[in-house]
Image (spheres, rainbow, N blue to C red):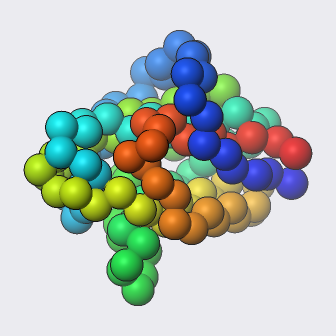
Amino acid sequence: MFAASLKKGFITLAASVPVFTLLCAAAEAGKSDFRVYNDTLATISHLYVTASDENSWAKNVLDGYTLPAGNNVQILFGDPSSERCYYDIRAEFSDGEIVEDFHVNVCESSDYTFFEE
């Protein structure tokens, strides 16, 4: 079973995965990066990061790519002047597992980690 957690200061080598831009939402002024870590044994095949006040999931930010186990991806926000901080995060894993976390404050930490329980 997978879980998710906010972690500050978590350091890992970046994967050779492209940087993605969220065009539909943004975080606090000047915040331009949000790194998602996959500290599980499975690949993340779909990743959704949607403003918490939205009623449906936004587009898959991996857009045809995957996030293999042990790797991470940086997501850049499209409008750094927005003051929006709360997002819902959903990961769909290659083994069929789905993990959702709601009302995550990305202004408090720029790192988000999926991990094995």
Image coordinates of residue 9 in percent, x first then y, are 55, 22
Residue at image point 28% right, 61% down: 84
How many labels, in total?
0
| Residue 43 as seen in the image, left or right of residue 95 | left
Front position in the image: 43 or 50: 50
Can residue 48 be seen here? no
Can residue 30 be seen here? yes
| Residue 79 as seen in the image, left or right of residue 32 | left
| Residue 31 as seen in the image, left or right of residue 99 | left
Tell me which corner region of the image, top left, top right, bottom left or bottom right, holds residue 56: bottom left
Residue at image point 18% right, 37% down: 30
Image coordinates of residue 94 in percent, x first then y, are 69, 52
Image coordinates of residue 106 in percent, x first then y, are 43, 48
Residue at image point 52% right, 66% down: 103
Front position in the image: 61 or 31: 31
Q: Quadrant of the N terminus?
A: bottom right
Front position in the image: 116 or 112: 112
Q: Quadrant of the C terminus?
A: top right
Residue at image point 42% right, 29% down: 17
Image coordinates of residue 61 in percent, x first then y, are 38, 53
Residue farthest to the bottom, as pictured: 55
Front position in the image: 82 or 54: 82
